[in-house]
Image (cartoon, rainbow, N blue to C red):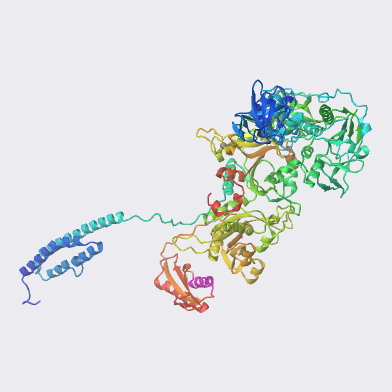
Amino acid sequence: MKASYRWLRELVPQLTASTTDLAARLTSAGLEVEGLIEFGLASEACLVVRVVSCRPHPTKSGLRLVTVDRGGSQQEVVCGAPNVPDLGGLVVLAPLGVYLPAKNVTIAKRAIAGVESEGMLCSEDELGLGDDHDGILVLAPDCATPGTTLAAAVPAARDTVFEINLTPNRPDGLGHIGLAREIAALYNFPFVLPDFATAGGMERAPSALSVRDLVTIVVEDAERCPHYGAAAVVDIAVTASPSTRYRLQALGVRSISNVVDVTNLVMLAWGHPLHAFDLDRVRGNTIVVRRANDGEKLTTLDGVTRELVSDDLLICDGQGPVALAGVMGGASSEIHEGTKRVLFEVACFDPRGVRRTARRHGLHTESSHRFERGVDPGDVESVLDHAVGLTVALAGGQPAAGRIHVQHAHSCAVPAPPAKRILTLRVARLRALLGVDVPFDEAIPILERLGCSVVAKSSISCDVLVPTHRPDLTREVDLIEEVLRVRGLDSVPAQLPAIRASRDVGGREELARRAREIAVSVGLSEAITYGFTSARALEAVGAPKPTVLLRNPLGEHHAVMRTSLLPGLLDAVAHARRHFERDVREFTIGQVFLAAAPSGDGLPTEQLRIGVVLAGDRPGWLEKPQPLDVWDAKGYAVGLTERLAGASALVQVEPATRDELTEIASHLHPRGAAFVHVNGRRIGAFGLLHPDAVAALALDGDVLVVELTLESFAEGIPIPQYAAIPRFPASTRDVALLVRDAVMAGEVESAVRAAAGPLAERVRLFDRFTGGHVAAGFASLAFRVVYRASSGTLTDAEVDAAHANVVKVVGERFGAKLR
Amino acid sequence: MDAVSDPTVETIELEITAALASLREAFLPRFRAAATAQALRDENAKILGKKGELTAILKLLGKAPPEGRKAIGEKVNALKQEVESGFESCLSNLRLREREAELSAPPFDLTLPARVPAQVGHKHPISIVREEVVAVFRQLGFAVFDGPEVEHEGNNFTALGFPPDHPATDMQDSFWTQSNHVLRTHTSNIQVRAMKSIAPPMAFIAPGTVYRRDDDATHSPMFHQIEAFLVDKDVTLAHLKGVLAEFAERLFGPGTPVRLRPSYFPFVEPGAEVDIGCVFCKQPNGTRAGCSLCKHTGFIEVLGCGMIHPVVFENCGIDPEVFSGFALGMGLERLAMLRYGVPNIKLMFDNDPRFLAQF
Ligand SMILES: [Zn+2]
C-alpha cells in the first residue's frame, strides 16, 4: 500500500510528526513502512514563471529562446519543447544549480547550439511528476504568481509516499481513511470523518431523474454479493483531470480522466474498490449479479478473453457479462470520452470467492487485493456519497436522485447497518497473556480510538462493539493485541520462564547430527540437496519408482519426492564439474519418501539416509595423484557404518550378486558393486556408478556412490564393554601365498583366520602383488598374522605349529603356494 | 715352561712398563683423531678389545712371576681406567660436536605441504547454524520434536487457523502432492503434532526442511526452519521476550539488543517480528553504526513469533483458558547468510566443494 503523507495530514490535521517519525511509529505498531518515496522533490526548487517573450533560436531550428518572468527578474532560456505557451502562460523553470532527482542532473550553465542557457523549462517527466515528456509542463493560467515555487503553487506536486507492507489481516489499512484512523489512534488525536456527501458540489440540485428510473439491479447470488450499492450521475463531461493528476501519480496510479480518477481516488480513500459503468452502454438498463455459466466468455479490460466457470461471479447487463465481480471490468461498458451518464457500483463481495476467481484467472488487481482481504460492509453509502460528490466536482453533471441498495437480495433505498460483533475483554486476561498489568483505564481508550465502543463494563470485564472496518477483530485476544500494538511491545518486560523440560520425540535430529559429525570426521563435506527430483533421475540411479508426485511442481526436474539421495548428490558433482572442479567428496543427510505404510496415517514413509559421492583424486602426500576407486568407496561405506554401528556390531561387505545387480543395484557398475550389512541386515550399497547412469545424468566421468539408511542406528551405539589389555607379548608371522588371480582376497583372509586358530589375534593382508616374477594369472597375497595368548607368552613351537596349519589349510583350499 | 726362553722377571717387567708407557702416550691422540663415534669405538676396541693392545699387555702379565704380578697388574688396570675415561670423555665431546652439527644443519623444508593425519570435511553452513540454534534451545530446556515433511493439510494449515482461500496463505504458497498432502510450508506443523499427542507442559523445538513454491533470487523452493514453542500454565508474552533475549545473547553475543514489531501470522496472537542488533556494524561500545546490510537501521530481522492463538489450542484439544504458550520460528538460510555474508541463497544449494570448504 502506498500512502500519501499530504493526504494523511489532510485527514489528521493535528499530525505534525515528520515523515521518518511517522514511518517509525507505524512500523512499531505493525504497519511496516518499507520505504519512503520523495515525490516531486524538484518542485521545492523549481519556480513558476511567466512567458514574456519568445523568439526562434538564431541557428538551430526547433529550438526557441524564451524569456520568462520569474517574479521581479527576467531571464532567457533555450527551450526545445513544441508546446511553449502564448505570452503570459505559466511554465516551470529549473534555475541554475537545481538538482532534478528524476533525471539525476543538476542544472548548469551551458551553451545550446551556441546560445547560453541558465536554466531549463521542465516537463513533468523531468520534474518527476509523471511520464509525460512530450512537452514542458504548462500550468493553469493565473494559478500562481511568477516566482513562487511549484510546490507552493501546486501543493500536490510535492509529497512523501509511504510504502507500507500491510499484513493480510488489516484491510482497513488499504485506504487513507483507515490509515488516518490508525495514525490518530497511535498519536491520540481525535479522528473525524470528513463529510464527503457535501464536499464539492453535492449542494447542486439532484436531477429530476431517480437512479431507479435509470437502471434495475438484480442480485442472484446474495451469498457471494451480500450488498450491491449503486448511484448515478448524469450530464457529466469526461475530461482530463489536472487537479487529481499528481495525487494519483504519487501513489503510482496513472491519471486517466476525471471520472476514472474518481473511482481510483475513492478506492484509495476508503480501501473499498468501486466500479464505474457508462450507463448508456449498460444494455437493457439492467445490472445482474450472478454466477457464470461454465464456458461463458468475457473480455476483460486487459484485452484478454477469459473462459469462465460456474464459480466465477459476474456483473452482467441485459445481454451478458460486463465485469468479473470484484476483480476486473470488461471493455464493453468502460468509461470513455463521450460518457454522459455514469453508474457507480459499490459492492461487498465474498472475499473467498473473489480470491478463487482472481487466482483462477491469474489476476491480481487493486480491486481483488482489497476484496480478498475484506472491505468494510458498513461504508457502502459513504463511498457512494464520496464518488458522487467528487464526480460532480470534477465532471459536473447532476446526481440522479436516490440510491439503489440490494442487501441480502432485498432492494432498499437506505441500507441496514451491518451487524457488529461484540467481544468481551477481561482485565485478567490482559495480564495473563501479556505478563504485565494493563488497567481498563488504559486499555479502553486505546480500543475506542481504533473505532471500538464499549457497551458494558464492570471492574473485571467489558463488552466491546467492534467496528465494521476491522473484520480481523474476532476474539478477545485480538483486542488484547490491539491494546498491545498501540501501547507498544516495548512496554512488556522480558522475563525468562521456568521451563519444565520435555524429552525428545523422534530421534532424527540427533541421529542426523551424529552421522554428520562422523561423515565430516572422515573427510566428507556436507551437501544439502533438494527433497524433490525428477522421475528420470531416480530411474537413472536405479531407485524405487517415486510414490509422492507433486501436483504443482516448479518443473519436471523437481516433480517428485526423492526415493534416493543420489540424484541430488550427483547434481552437485555435475555442477562442480561444469565449474572445472573435479574433486568432490560430499555427503548429504536427508529423507527419502517411500510408499506409505499400510497401517499408517496415509503419509509416505520418510526414511533418513546418508548418501556419499566421491569423484576426482584421493588426497595423498607428495605423490602422484591417484583417482579414487571402489576401495575408497568401500572405505567410506565401511568406515561410516562402523562408527555409526559401534564396535560391537558386525559390519560386512557383500559383493552384489547378478540378481541383485539387476533388481536393486542397477545403477552400479557390475564389477564394482557391493552391499553393507550390519549384524546380517542390509543397510545400503556402494560402488562405481554404472556408465549408463553416468551417461543418463551427463556426469562427464566416473563417480563413486554410497547410500546407507540411518534408521537402524537411531538407538545410538551400544555402550562398549571393557576388554582386558593383553599382558603378554605377541608373535608375528608373515605368509605370502600365490593364488589364482580370480580368488577373492577376502576368502583367503577368512581361511587364514580360521586356520590360524584361536591364538591368532589379528590377520591382515599387507601386500597384493601381480606381474614381475609372479606368473600370469596368479597373484601374491601377503598376510601378517599376530599370535597371542592371554594366559602367557607363546613359545616359538606353539606359534610355528599354528602357522604351519595356515600354510597347509590355505594351500589345500586355494591351491595356494608359499612364496 | 721353557726355562731357556723363560725371561727374567725384570725383562718382563721392563717390557710391560715400556708397552704401558708407549700406550699411555698414544691412546689419547688416537682417540682424539677419531672423527665419528664409530671410529672412536673402533679405536677403543683396538686397545681394550679381545685382541686389543692393552689386552695383549695383560696377557704378558701371565708370564711374569707371581710375586711381581700384583704390582704390574695394578699398573695395567690403572692404564685401563685411564683409557676408559679417555674414551668416555672423547665420546661425549664427539657427541656434543655431532649434536651441534645436527642442530646447525639446514632446516627441514617446512614449506612442503603438511601430511594431514586425516582429512576433515566441512559441515554445511546451514547445519552449523542449525546445530548451534538447537544447542542454545536445549540449554534453555527445550527438546526436539520430529515430524514429517509431507504433511496433512490439517496439520500444516487448518489446525493452525489458516482460513481457506485467505490471502494469509499467499505468504506460504505451497506444493501439493497428488494424494492431496502438502509439503510442509513451515515447521509449525510440529506445534499441532505435539499438542495433539502430548499434554502440556511442553517445551519443544522443531528443526527441519520446509517447502514453498517460490524460486527467485531471494527464495529457494526448499529451505530450513527452526520452530520453538512452550505451552504451560501462565506463559506470557514477557516470557517470550525473555527467551528471545536469552537466545539472541547466546547466539549472537552478550548485549545483543532485541526489538519486537507487531506482525501477523494466523497461528499466533499477538504476533510479532523480531529484529536483533545488526551484527555487521556493531561498534566496540555495543552500539550500531548502521550499514547497508541493516539498511542503516542498526537492526536486522531474524524471526517471527507470538503467543499461540487460542484457535490453535482449541483445534489441538487444549483449553486456552487453562494453558497459554508462545511460538517462534526462524529461517536458517537467512541466519547462515547473515552470519557468513553469503550474498545469494542459491549458493547454499549448489554444493560447490569450494563453497563448502569455507565453513
Ligand atoms: Zn548494520
Whether residue B209 can be seen here:
no
Left or right: A124 as drawn, with respect to A772: right
Q: How many marks?
A: 0
Q: Which residues are magenta?
A: A743-757
Q: In terms of image quadrants, where is residue B238?
A: top right
The residue under the point 62% across, 59% down is A566
Residue B25 picture location, percent across and down = 12, 62
Q: Is residue A420 above or below residue A638?
A: above
Q: Quadrant of the N terminus of chain B?
A: bottom left
Residue A611 picture location, percent across and down = 60, 58
Q: In terms of image quadrants, where is residue B246?
A: top right
Query: B316 or A280, which lies in front?
Result: A280
Please tell me whether residue A754 belongs to the stretch shown in magenta: yes
Left or right: A648 as drawn, with respect to B31: right
Please tell me whether residue B344 belongs to the stretch shown in magenta: no
Whether residue B66 can be seen here:
yes
Q: Ligand 1 appears in which quadrant? A: top right
Residue A229 picture location, percent across and down = 87, 33
Q: Residue furthest front?
A: A58
Q: In terms of image quadrants, where is residue A90?
A: top right
Left or right: A688 as drawn, with respect to A346: left
Residue A473 picture location, percent across and down = 76, 33
Instruction: Name the main secondary structure of what is drawn in magenta.
Output: helix
